[in-house]
Amino acid sequence: MGDGEYRLMVRRESGPDEDLEVFSQSARFGPAAVASGSVATPADAHSAVAVGAVPWAGDLIAPYSSWGPTDDGRAKPDLVAPTYVTSNPAFPGTAGTSAATAHVAGAALLLRRRRLSAGLDVTVSAMRDVLLRRTRDLGETGADPVFGHGLFRVDTAPPIVRMRFDARRRLLAVRAADNASLWSLVVRPAGRRATRTRRAYVRVRIPVRARSRRVVVAATDMARNRTVRTITVPGGP
Ligand SMILES: [Ca+2]
Ligand SMILES: [Ca+2]
């Protein structure tokens, strides 16, 4: 369609009142557009795994990613996956649910192969359960119409952990980096309660003791890759 204003007229010849839904990739519907209930066919099929899109560097839904529920009230999408990925050198920054869907399809294939060789169930419902269980919840707590069960993401690289101890202030600064998919950061000084956070940066005060002590830092990403580092903090006078 070229630029300009278009009008759409629908006349009911017979039958009961029904809502008419109009989808368009290019026409802007202005204030008439609603995100809710925008999951289109075939993603709304009963046994389909409908994948929404989240730009890989964050946890925000892509503006074009359709929201559930379906017209008959079923929860969709099922999950979301990364988009704007750079894994295809021919199209760096490939965007869309097209990228997110391929991510999940590839992962499903790998999981299926692994489950087959382990003698596990690889039926559609079993595979669907496996995928949904491996998501990280986003947005409203629990399954929701924007993110479904949450973000599914193939990730093989463990977080990078950096630590610095300020001896004068007795503060241990810990920073974990994992391309925005850090799941937890735990700082556990020997003999003391651990500090747990979802943030990528935390400072923990290590009280003065006569002897030096070991502090264990563990960072886990949402794919459950884990980095454990230890630092020995000097004792006081
Ligand atoms: Ca949620
Ligand atoms: Ca990672």
Image (cartoon, rainbow, N blue to C red):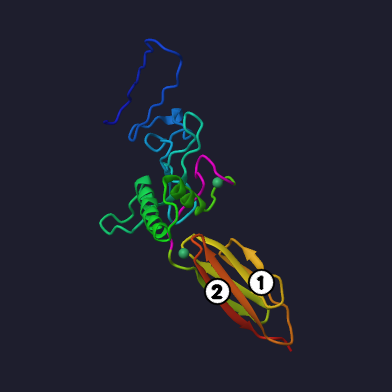
* Circle 2 Cα neighbour tier, 10 Å, few/some/many (<14 / 14–19 / ≥20): some
Q: Position of residue 164 (x, y in %)?
A: 58, 77
The magenta stretch is 142-155
- Where residue 204 is drawn, which disc sits there? 1
- Which amino acid type corresponds to the residue marked 1 in the rendered image? Val
Q: Residue at x 54, y 65 (%)?
A: 220
The verdict on label 1 being within 8 Å of ligand 2 is: no
Main secondary structure of the magenta stretch: loop
The verdict on label 2 being within 8 Å of ligand 2 is: no
Q: Residue at x 34, y 21 (%)?
A: 7
Q: Position of residue 127 (x, y in %)?
A: 44, 50
Task: Decide which of tag 1 and tag 2 comes sooner along the chain.
Answer: 1
- Which amino acid type corresponds to the residue marked 2 in the rendered image? Val
Q: Which quarter of the rendering shows the N terminus?
A: top left
Q: Position of residue 207 (x, y in %)?
A: 73, 78
Instruction: Tell which residue pokes out farthest to the top in this image.
Output: 14
The answer to whether residue 154 is above or below residue 74 is below
Q: Under tag 2, what secondary structure?
A: strand
Contact check, label 1 and label 2, Cβ < 8 Å: no
Q: Which quarter of the rendering shows the C terminus?
A: bottom right
In the rendered image, which residue does mark 2 sit on? 228
The answer to whether residue 222 is above or below residue 124 is below
Q: Is residue 149 in the magenta section? A: yes
Q: Observer-nearest residue: 222 or 96?
A: 222
Per the model, the C-alpha gap separating discs 1 and 2 is 17 Å
Q: Quadrant of residue 64?
A: top left
Q: Under tag 1, what secondary structure?
A: strand
* Circle 1 Cα neighbour tier, 10 Å, few/some/many (<14 / 14–19 / ≥20): some
